[in-house]
Amino acid sequence: MSAPSKKPKSLMLTVLISGSALAYALFVFLPTQKSIASIRSELAQQRNDILALGSLESEIVELERRIAAVRSTIDTWHEHAPTAQETATFIGVVSQLAQQAGVRVDRITPRSLVKMSALEQHPADLTMEGDFAQIADFLQQLEQRPETIWITRLNLAASGEAGANVRCELSFTVFADNPDDSD
């Protein structure tokens, strides 16, 4: 009669072990697996971020190189930029360049000063006459000046005769440092 009493004990032991295994799976194993999967996902994201940072490093180096080039250009411009007082005498420089090129200056008219945040524009109009080679020589000399000069309008008109003089109407702007700028 002892055989029937062993079955309920072994069944009870089996149920107890199965229940423990099920409880372990539900309350320990599955939550731990979810946590591990979450950590793996976070680790994969951090690896991707590190790889992305590697490419950003080369972009940063390139941007720093470009910033240095811009600063160098600005420094060079500041070295050659005329002051407001120097731009007042620049009309005389233009007249001298024209005379050196053999061009006859009919009129030089300064226009209104344009103040900007970091610089000033000093525009002027120039009317001159000479042969084409003389005017080209004048323009080349003007272009070679260290100041920043923009030619905003250039009009050449021939008299109609071969070898005759050319009339040139020119508008230009000289850029100067703005003394009101705090930089």
Image (spheres, grey):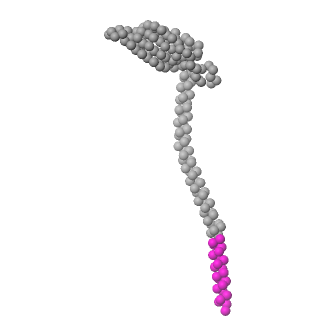
- On screen, 11 above or below 160? below
- On screen, 50 above or below 28? above
* Residue 127 part of the magenta segment: no
Could you tell me which residue is drawn at 66 percent across and 86 percent down?
Answer: 6
Residue 80 visible in the displayed image: no
Residue 71 visible in the displayed image: yes
Q: Which residues are magenta?
A: 1-23
Q: Position of residue 89 (x, y in %)?
A: 55, 11
Could you tell me which residue is drawn at 59 percent across and 13 percent down?
Answer: 85
Q: Position of residue 21 (x, y in %)?
A: 63, 72
- On screen, 101 above or below 32? above
Which residue is at the front of the view, 17 or 95? 95
Q: Position of residue 56 (x, y in %)?
A: 54, 42
Quadrant hosting residue 34: bottom right
* Residue 5 part of the magenta segment: yes
- On screen, 15 above or below 102? below
Q: Position of residue 182 (x, y in %)?
A: 64, 23
Could you tell me which residue is drawn at 55 percent across and 14 percent down?
Answer: 87
Could you tell me which residue is drawn at 56 percent across and 12 percent down?
Answer: 88
Q: Quadrant of the N terminus?
A: bottom right
Q: Quadrant of the C terminus?
A: top right
Work out which residue is located at the far bottom of the displayed protein and give it. 1
Quadrant hosting residue 137: top left
